[in-house]
Image (spheres, grey):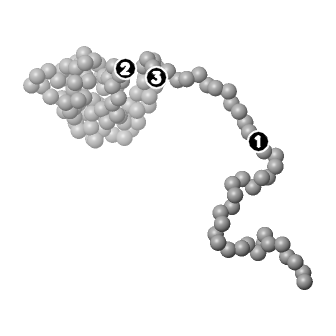
């Protein structure tokens, strides 16, 4: 984080994101918590994967991010989803207003797309002529 200090599980790109959100030391991370740190990174406009969330939790607990129990990962993912949903959409990323819905219905069976020609005649479609 600050020069000479490296958090466990945190690579240079993630460390830069954290520095830009005010988290520079292990103490900063512990004080903020893994979930809030992840949300800060998202709020800053970066696009972290959930691996960052697990890495932050591992950095706080002093373990590899893959050692975070599945139950805790699920809790973190659920909480992160709820928190991220509260964030405003970035400018220019607003959802467009929904347009009118048009339903097209055909009461006739027009057969849809033409049947492919496989190079042979289908006897069921040939007209029978009695001589």
In this orientation, which residue lies closer to the viewer: 31 or 37? 37
Give the residue at mark 2. 43
Q: Earlier in the sequence, mark 3 or mark 2?
A: 2
Residue at the limit of the structure toward the right, as seen here: 131
x 22%, y 24%: residue: 16
x 31%, y 36%: residue: 51
The quarter holding residue 41 reads top left
Q: Is 33 placed left or right of 5 in the picture? A: right
User: Which mark is drawn over residue 23?
Assistant: none
> Residue 35: x, y in percent?
34, 25
Check the image and report above or below for 15 versus 128. above
Rounded to the nearest angstrom, the CA distance separating label 3 from label 2 is 14 Å
Closer to viewer: mark 3 or mark 2? 3
The secondary structure type at the circle numbered 2 is helix
Give the residue at mark 1. 105
Dots 3 and 1: beta carbons under 8 Å? no
User: Which mark is drawn over residue 93?
Assistant: 3
x 90%, y 81%: residue: 130
In this orientation, which residue lies closer to the viewer: 28 or 52? 52
Dots 3 and 2: beta carbons under 8 Å? no
Dots 1 and 2: beta carbons under 8 Å? no
Quarter the C terminus occupies: bottom right
The quarter holding residue 60 reads top left
Check the image and report above or below for 68 versus 98. below
> Residue 54: x, y in percent?
31, 34
Q: Is 21 placed left or right of 130 in the picture? A: left
Q: Is residue 61 visible?
A: no
């Amino acid at each position: 984080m600050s020069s000479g200090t490296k958090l466990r599980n945190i690579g240079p790109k993630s460390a830069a994101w954290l520095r830009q959100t005010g988290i520079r030391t292990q103490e900063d991370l512990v004080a903020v918590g893994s979930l809030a740190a992840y949300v800060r990174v998202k709020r800053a406009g970066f696009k972290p994967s959930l691996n960052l969330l697990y890495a932050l939790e591992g950095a706080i607990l002093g373990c590899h991010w893959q050692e975070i129990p599945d139950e805790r990962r699920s809790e973190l993912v659920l909480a992160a989803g709820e928190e991220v949903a509260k964030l405003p959409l970035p400018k220019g990323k607003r959802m467009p207003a929904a347009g009118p819905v048009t339903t097209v219905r055909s009461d006739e069976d027009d057969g849809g797309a033409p049947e492919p020609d496989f190079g042979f005649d289908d006897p069921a479609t040939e007209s029978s002529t009695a001589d």
